[in-house]
Amino acid sequence: MDSLDDERTTILNVVSDYNRAEDEPSSFTKLPVQWGESESLDNNNSLICLRGTADNGLQKLYKPVKAWKCDLAKAKPEISALSRDNNWIKLLKPRKSFEDMIRTILITMHCLHFFKRKSEASSKSL
């Protein structure tokens, strides 16, 4: 019986083909960034609705998110959004129509990740 309860309460933590749910496009940069685990985001009233798919496109996702973060410690940088329920959702590939909007963030995160791993590298090697 416990396994059935666990399956029902599974939290979707990876989303792809994502974009903003609102008609008016804007970037996640409108939301605060969480730079550290100890940083509190409880006073944040900003919400953006995230729309995308999970489970390889089998499940549609529509969640309000209130913050975002970038993890540069992994082999590839990971960008995540914090849902209103305080669960982190890893953002994979954006929807084509949203790529132009988020491209600057993705390029910046990849550059930061590169120079964090190879601090002695020149700008030419980037």
Image (cartoon, rainbow, N blue to C red):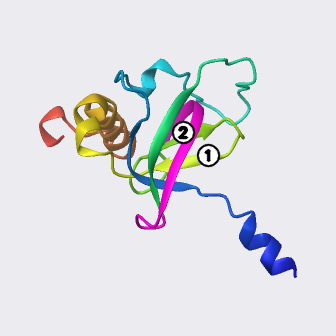
User: Residue at horizontal 18%, vertical 40%?
Assistant: 126
Name the element at disc 2.
strand
Q: Is residue 113 left or right of residue 66?
A: left
Q: Position of residue 109 (x, y in %)?
A: 36, 36
Q: On screen, 13 above or below 51?
A: below
Q: Amino acid at mark 1?
A: Trp
Q: Position of residue 113 (x, y in %)?
A: 37, 42
User: Residue at horizontal 12%, vertical 36%?
Assistant: 124
Answer whether residue 63 is magenta in the image. yes
Say which of 74 and 29 sits in front.
29
Which residue reaches farthest front? 23
Q: Which residue is mark 1?
A: 88
Q: Residues within 10 Å of mark 2 (few under 14, many from 20)?
A: many
Say which of 22 and 114 sits in front.
22
User: Residue at horizontal 67%, vertical 46%?
Assistant: 87
Q: Which residue is mark 2?
A: 81
- Region of the chain picked out in magenta, as a range: 55-70
Asked if disc 1 and disc 2 are in contact, CB closer than 8 Å, the reply is yes
Report the disc number at residue 12. none
Q: Amino acid at mark 2?
A: Ala
Q: On screen, 69 above or below 25?
A: below
